[in-house]
Structures are given as structure tokens and as C-alpha cells.
Image: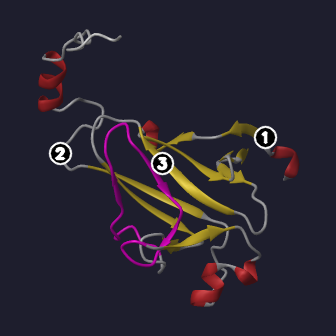
Amino acid sequence: MISSWRYTGSGMQQAASGLVEWGVKSGWGSLKNYNSGSRRYVVGRKGRNYSLVVKNLCHSRLEVVLSVDGLDVMDGKSASFGKRGYIIQPGKTLTVKGFRTSESAVAAFKFSSMSASYSKLRHGTTRNVGVIGMAVFTEKGVDPWKWSRPAVHQRHGATPFAEAPNARAR
């Protein structure tokens, strides 16, 4: 199997038919990506924190439901397509640093052994340890590749040149 692995670069990769770009960040930058068949792998260092980064590439809002080790990042419980996710505005980037434990706190994502994983410690299972999941949902009735009417109107009324400052520099 190792002979079928190929390095595909560091950083973000597109997913969900190009609606998003995502990656795993640790330390100062994104982790290297390796692909084998249709699966993507990243290699982290034991004990290091990491975060998930998702950028919305389309022209409408998206809802992104993320899971790590089979657990929903919003509540740290079993992941499901039916759960709520994060809303990402067009062109914006979401960084998720851990499992949400309250409105203002998270349990940081950390590379560990299977026996020391959050999933094993909180729920007694290692079934999906090492698996990152992402489901991307568009707004009902909205084409994510077309600009909305208000956005088009705003762009048509935009001034193509910056206005002169009120005061001169000295």
C-alpha cells in the first residue's frame, strides 16, 4: 500500500465539488498531504495541537459539519449528518481548534496514541480515531456559484477607484 501513496503538497485541498478548500494546520503551517486512492492522509507529531481550516470558495453561505475521530466538533459527541454545523460566509475561512465544550471554550485537537485519544477517554471507543469527516451543505434554493441580487447590485454601484483623502499628508 505504501507504494501507492503520493505526496500532494502542503496546505489546502479542494473538496465538495470545489465549494470549499480545507486542510489541517499544526504549528506554523499546514501539514503535508498524502493521497492513496481516494483517501487523503496527513501526518502529525504526537503531542502537538492541530486545527481544521475550511475556506468557502463559492458565492453563498455554506454550513459545514465537521467530525474528528467520529465525534462532532460542536459537542464532542457521536457525529451525524443531522447535526448542526458552522456557517461560513462567501470567501471566508473557518479555523476550528478543538471540540466545543461551551460557548467560549474548546478541548484542543491533539495528535495522540489511540488509547489517549479524546474519543477513547470520553466515550471508550477507538473505532474512528484518526478520521476527519466533513459534510458541506448549501442554502436551500440558492445556486452557490451565482452572486445574489443584492451582491450584484452592490458590485455594480461600487467605485472602481479609491477616493482622495480629505487631508493631505505632511
Q: Secondary structure at mark 2?
A: loop
Q: Secondary structure at mark 3?
A: strand
Residue 105 falls left or right of residue 52: left
Which comes before the other along the chain, label 2 or label 1? 1
Q: Residue at x 36, y 63 (%)?
A: 85
Q: Nearer the viewer, residue 162 or 132?
A: 162
Check whether the beta carbons of the residues at disc 3 and disc 1 lie within 8 A of each other.
no
Q: Which mark is residue 107?
A: none
Mark 3 to mark 1 CA distance (whole Å)? 23 Å
Is disc 2 surrounded by few (<14), some (14 to 19) or many (20+) residues within 10 Å? few
Where does label 2 land, which residue?
Answer: 141
Which comes before the other along the chain, label 3 or label 2? 3
Magenta range: 79-104
Question: In which quarter of the view is residue 90 placed?
Answer: top left
Where does label 3 land, which residue?
Answer: 54
Residue 90 falls left or right of residue 68: left
Q: Nearer the viewer, residue 27 or 17?
A: 27
Q: In x, y percent, where is residue 165?
A: 24, 14
Q: Residue at x 15, y 16 (%)?
A: 156
Q: Secondary structure at mark 1?
A: strand
Mark 3 to mark 2 CA distance (whole Å)? 23 Å
Which comes before the other along the chain, label 3 or label 1? 1
Name of the residue lying farthest toward the front? 170
Question: In which quarter of the view is residue 19 placed?
Answer: top left
| The C terminus - image quarter | top left
- In the rendered image, residue 29 lying in the magenta stretch gets the answer no
Where does label 1 land, which residue?
Answer: 6
> What amino acid is at disc 2?
Gly
Q: Nearer the viewer, residue 52 or 148?
A: 52
